[in-house]
Image: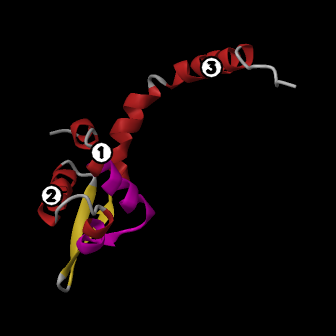
Amino acid sequence: MDVFEAIAEPSRRELLDLLSERERPAGELVAHLHKLTQPAVSRHLRILREVGLVEVRPDGQRRIYALRADRLIEIENWISRYRRYWPRHLDALENHLTQNQKEPTE
C-alpha cells in the first residue's frame, strides 16, 4: 500500500488529523474514534505506520503515536502539479455566485 491508498480511508485521515495536533497514546486515539473498535483502530494505525505516516514509541505500558509530516511531501508534490488550476476555478465559482445572487426581496 502507498501513501495515497492509506489516506483514502476516512478513519485513517481522522487519525492523521488528531496526530497533527500532537502525539497521542493509542488509547486516546481509540477513544476519539468511538465508532471503531480498538482492533480496527490498531489496524489503521499499523497501515499508517507501514507507509511511514506515523511513528510509534513505547512509553511504559502505553504506545505513543506521532505524525511523520515528512511523508506528506509525497502528497504535496503530487498536488502541486494541479495548484495552478485552482485560481481559475475559484474565479469561475466567484463569477457564478455573483451572477446568480438573488436580489433581496423587499
Classify the position of the C terminus by image quarter.
top right
- Mark 3: few, some, or many residues within 10 Å (few <14, many ≥20)? few
Q: Residue at x 25, y 67 (%)?
A: 30
Which of 56/13 is in front?
13
- Left or right: residue 93 versus residue 61 is right
Q: For the residues marked 1 and 3, what is the alpha-carbon distance in whole angstroms?
A: 27 Å
Q: Secondary structure at mark 2?
A: helix
Q: Secondary structure at mark 3?
A: helix
Please name the residue that numbered disc 1 is placed on: 10
- Left or right: residue 84 versus residue 81 is right
Q: Secondary structure at mark 1?
A: helix
Magenta segment range? Answer: 12-29
Question: In the rendering, which numbered label is found on residue 40?
Answer: 2
Is there CB contact under 8 Å for labels 2 and 3?
no
Name the amino acid, label 1.
Answer: Pro
Is there CB contact under 8 Å for labels 1 and 3?
no
Q: Is residue 88 above or below residue 62?
A: above
